[in-house]
Amino acid sequence: MKAIEESCIAIIVFSEDYASSRWCLEELAKIIESKEQKNLIVLPVFYKVDPREVREGRKSYQRSLARHEFKFGKDSEKVKRWKKALPMLGICPGGTLMMGKDESELIQEIVNKISTYLDRPLHVAKHPIGIYSRVTELKSMLKLESNDGVPMVGLWGQGGIGKTCLAKALYNALFRKFEGACFLANVRETSKDSKCLVTLQETILNDILLPQQRLEVSNVDVGSNLIQRRLGCKKVLLILDDVDALCHLNALAGKGEWFGNGSRIIVTTRDKQLLTCHWIDQDHVYKVEALSNSEAHELLSKHAFQTHQIRTDRVDGALKYAKGLPLALEVLGSSLCDTTEDVWESTIKKLSRNPDKDINNVLKVSFDGLDENEKEIFLHIACFFKGWAREHTKKVLDSCDLETIVGFDILIKRSLISIEGGILQMHDLIQVMGMDIVNRECRDDPGRCSKLWLYDDVVDVLSRDMGDCAVKAIVLALPEPTEMRINPDDFTKLRRLRLLILHNVHSSFQGPICLPSELRWFEWPGCAHENPKFSASPKKLVGLNMSKGNITEFLKQFKAFQNLKYINFSHCELMVRTPDLSCTPNLEELDFSNCKNLVEAHESIAYLDKLQVLNLSMCSELSVFPNVLMSKNLRVLNFYHCTKFERFPDISHKLEGFEVLFLEGVAIKELPTSIENLVALKIMYIHDCKNLEHLPSNIYKLQNLENLRVQHCTNLIEFPQYENSVDSCMKAGLSNLRQLNLTGCNLSQVEFLENLSCFPLLEDLILSANNITTLPSINKRDHLVRLRVRDCHQLQEILKLPSSLRYFLAKNCESLQNIEDLTKVHSFVHGDLADMVIDSHGKMPQWVLPIEEGFLSFMASKDLYDKILGLVICYVLNNDRLGRPFFQIESSVNGKMQLSNIENYHSRLDSVHLGIEYAFPSKLWGDVDFVQIDRRYLQFGLTLSGESLNKWGVRIICKQLGEDLKVELRDNQLIDPALLYEVSNELTDSPAESSLVHEDNSSIADRPEDLQDSQMGTEEHSQTGSKRNHEFISHPRHAN
């Protein structure tokens, strides 16, 4: 019952025999209670039963209820609750699955419905002070109890007041009450043109409908009609955040009639007039007020944490300046965090000179406290790089002689920027403040500003002759392709220009474009010009990106580029050969990916001493590559899908930094013996190399290799033997290898595994889909944790498995013979082998006690329970070609359901399979407190259920029992003695050295014919074993 109380969703599968189980009906009544009291979401599924039988209590449901009435009496309150619950859930919207219908359709429908409710809460704030009281006020305004009409509510307030945080908190509190929900963030920033509005319309439709295939919209008008048509009958929650134009509202939520009755539309904006123009009356406009003094004090204290006392007047001065604005309190508080009192005094005095200035001045306090390095980084992010990738921005700013790593760190601590998922983010107000600082350099003359990011300003500067131009950086990232007239010498006038990035800028001028020599970073994807030219003075360029351009080849263009580190010529489909890069000694990253007509890589590419990353992926015509690779600092080499690449280069000397090698879909027949010089290699992927016939034996010399995947290389018939490459200086071959994956490589023997001198630390071994007939003895590989040999159809024998093995998969190995040896109890007594799935022809090991009734129940005292080490649970699954075989384990203590953490999904099975799992008592029954429950004996229950489950059994592994405990068990008949498997006490803490007291079929006493119910005061628990069809999803701790 605790699982129901902690769940946010309950799925009930009504079957023909559902009502025969009083436990199912008891849980059903609990679900009804949670539904009424806690808004538990209930999804009923009718499996091969008519919903009317459930709702009206007919047929099997009528018979079952009659039996319950006979047992408990017609006036039983318990039976009355059950009879009341059935019709209430029988009319809930769910799915109906009748005999002969496709189960996969119902499963997909259930998944779609659950997906609507799970994993959707939004992050609100680090310190959500004052938010939830306002959520309560908004709930009242929304009148959630009414399903009449579609109220629209506006959240209005100045920037930084907390509108977005409040809207997120409101969304989290409400979204489960609707059939679909969508929080559309940053509408103002995202809706810069009609194409962006189309994207937002698509987001609304896909977030709410959750279609199997993403819906696409061709234009705004089509999108508006589609929203009306598809959402007009749905009760939805739609929040539009930061709207600043009426056209946004008209396109995204034109009228309330677009949505089903009971829907709620919420809009956050800085413009109150916008809400009025959209027919949102004043009663539905919620003004987001500043925080109260106490709330502001608490929020400031959270951000301005102090290790020493600050005088009250200093704190009051800060609060007076921030005036309850949450963003100002956060920024100011972070600036004052753990500073001395004199810093507080100085800061407050500085603010006291301008007490009534707007939010820009509040935010500028943090900016004024920065050093020049951090100021420049901040202004670059505010003007250019908000929403850009952190790593790319770092390279750009580093090229401009800024110390970016420390700069990012300081800006994050000052709450001026954040990094979310590797993306630079900044609050709108902070960004506006930064832009304002740059604009103040000269508002009337963009040529005297250091940074330009607006189209008109760039055109203005380029169109006139400039004297002393101050522009150092231009980043023009336009939302859609835009024509701009750029003459060949326009940029040479900007003698101080260091940074030039042009996205979606098209110029009709043909021929080379001239660039100033001070330029550090040039990025123009899709540039139609020929190769750029630079002035005759020394070149300072660090980054060059002309991807998707018309580049054919470079001749002497790179002769003077001593500082160049990054080149991106990806997607340059006219390029046939790479340029001569011998005069770029500092080059670190080189990207020629997707140059589909690239045939030849210039010899110089192999001699770049500082080159770290070389990406030639998807260069499908590449056939000429240097014979020798000399780049001593290379870290990553990618030849993915270079289908004509036939010869891997020789490695002439040891490469100390080379860590990752991708060889997927290439035409190589072998690797050179010099592969041993990749001494730092950690990851090597060789995938789908159909021509690869063998691997060099000295591959064993790669002492740092951790992950080796050689997959689907169908001409590779053997893996090299370690004996062929004995090296007196080596203690072991591939000494650091953790994972070896040889899936689908046509191997017929794997004797190399017997040699313990190779890969001694191997943890994960995958030999699936090979032609092996025998797996040799690997029992001494004491680090091996996972072994997979699935789809080895000729595999007949597995000799010995190591005691360290925790997971063993042998699905669809129908020729396997020695199953009994693999499933001995010795492997499981200490939980050494925790999970096994094997093609078993439906047989369970003899040492496992079959559970004939489908339900296991036993009594245990604290003394006995403390002796239990774990349970070995054995199950047999039928083949299921329609879906993924699934079962789950449910457990109970004294009839109270526990939230079991054990669920099992399996991929398609071609035949009947055996699975064995080891589970610790705490995983099944949680922390059991005998004292708190105040019972000497507790009743423990265990059930396995699932459509593909054929049969199951259990054996309890325990420490040796004392004579007194044995007598107690025998006299009280608390547990079937045959369930217990004892191990010696002195070895229970040393699994590797354990020896068994009993043989596989032994027990501490003869098994009685029937289990007896205990009479120790515990409520009688049904052992009929009817498979319960409840599945609880606890939020947010739902099972993986």
Image (tube, rainbow, N blue to C red):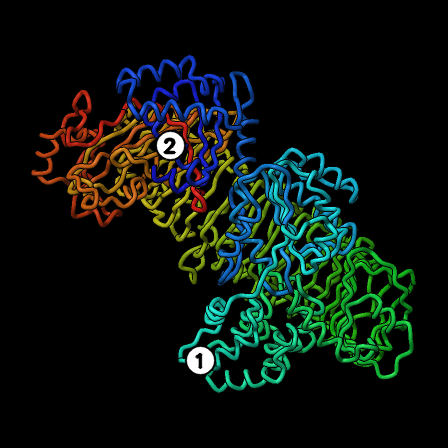
Q: Residues within 10 Å of mark 1 (few under 14, many from 20)?
A: few
Give the residue drawn at x 37%, y 32%: 915
Mark 1 or mark 2: whose residue is earlier in sequence = 1
Nearest the viewer among 952 and 142 is 142
Using the rendered view, name the quadrant where residue 499 is placed.
Answer: bottom right
Q: Amino acid at mark 2?
A: Gly
Nearest the viewer among 726 and 482 is 482
Give the residue drawn at x 55%, y 19%: 101
Please state the horizontal and vertical placement of residue 159, each as a whole percent of the image.
Answer: 64, 64
Using the rendered view, name the quadrant where residue 245 is placed.
Answer: bottom right
How many tags in the picture? 2
Please state the horizontal and vertical placement of residue 81, each as a whole percent of the image.
Answer: 35, 26
| Label 1 sits on residue | 312
| Label 2 sits on residue | 915
Please state the horizontal and vertical placement of residue 31, each as a whole percent of the image.
Answer: 40, 33
Q: Amino acid at mark 1?
A: Thr
Horizontal side of 25 relative to 470 (left or right) equals left
Q: Which quarter shows the C terminus?
A: top left
In space, the residues marked 1 and 2 are separated at their CA atoms by 67 Å
Horizontal side of 67 relative to 451 (left or right) equals left
Q: Is residue 569 above or below residue 14?
A: below
Please state the horizontal and vertical placement of residue 256, each as a whole percent of the image.
Answer: 68, 41
Q: Is residue 562 above or below residue 797?
A: below
Q: Residues within 10 Å of mark 2 (few under 14, many from 20)?
A: many
Judged by depth in the image, the label closer to the viewer, 1 or 2, is: 1
Q: Are marks 1 and 2 in contact (CB under 8 Å)?
A: no
Residue 576 visible here: no
**Residue 524: assigned label:** none
- SS for dot 1: helix
Q: Is residue 68 above or below residue 713?
A: above
Q: Which quarter shows the N terminus?
A: top left
Give the residue drawn at x 36%, y 25%: 82
